[in-house]
Amino acid sequence: MPYHPGLASEDAEAAFGEVDYRLQRRRLLRDIACGIVDRDEACEIHPELLRVARSAAPHTGGSCPLCNEDELRLVAYVFGPRLGPGGKCVVSDHELQRIARRQGHFVSYEVEVCAKCGWNYLLRRYPLH
Ligand SMILES: [Zn+2]
């Protein structure tokens, strides 16, 4: 299933610790390679997420597991008080630090996005302190 940031707030009760999704990512990539999962489905992406990734998100340094292009970016969605139901899209560490210093509980969802083919995957979720 492609990651959809809008659904993330439903996991709120489980959001107090760090969750790493990289194992599931490996499994998904294997399933795509075997044809169990449709590649187009894995590359379905919200237009806003793709726009942010292309315009402002930092490169991860890795290449896309699907198209092999050097276009992997890292986008974070932060959920918490006054950030709205869809969370806030954050592309810099500086901004993350600023939110972390505010009052309240904030959770960051780190999403890997390929600006070329649209591959997007939630890598991990962790609380901001
Ligand atoms: Zn790609």
Image: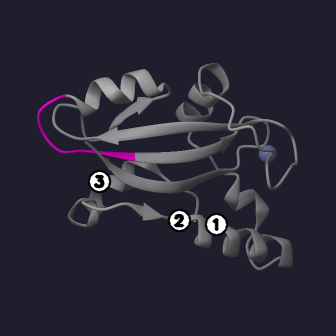
Q: Quadrant of residue 78?
A: top left
Camera-side residue of 87 and 104: 104
Residue at 29%, 23% (x, y): give it: 98
Which mark is first along the chain, 2 or 3? 3
Per the model, the C-alpha gap separating discs 2 and 1 is 6 Å
Find numbered disc 1 in the image and state the secondary structure of the residue it sits on: helix
- Residue 60 percent across, percent down from the top left: 68, 38
The residue type indicated by label 2 comes to: Tyr
- For the residues carrying marks 3 and 2, which lies nearer the camera in this image? 2
The residue type indicated by label 3 comes to: Ser
Tag of residue 103: none
Camera-side residue of 44 and 67: 67
- Residue 24 percent across, percent down from the top left: 59, 72
Instruction: Report the span colored magenta.
Output: 102-108
Up/down of 97 relative to 75, above or below: above
Camera-side residue of 80 and 99: 99
The residue type indicated by label 1 comes to: Arg
For ligand 1, give the image quadrant: top right
- Residue 72 percent across, percent down from the top left: 72, 40
Q: Is residue 12 left or right of residue 113?
A: left
Q: Mark 1 Cα within 10 Å, few/some/many (few <14, many 20+)?
A: some
Q: Are marks 2 and 1 in contact (CB under 8 Å)?
A: yes
Q: Quadrant of residue 40?
A: bottom right
Per the model, the C-alpha gap separating discs 3 and 2 is 16 Å
Residue at 56%, 41% (x, y): give it: 46
Q: Is residue 69 left or right of residue 113?
A: right
Find numbered disc 2 in the image and state the secondary structure of the residue it sits on: loop
Q: Which residue is mark 2?
A: 21
Q: Can residue 103 be found in the magenta stretch?
A: yes
Q: Which residue is mark 3?
A: 9
Q: Which residue is mark 1?
A: 25
- Residue 91 percent across, percent down from the top left: 50, 27
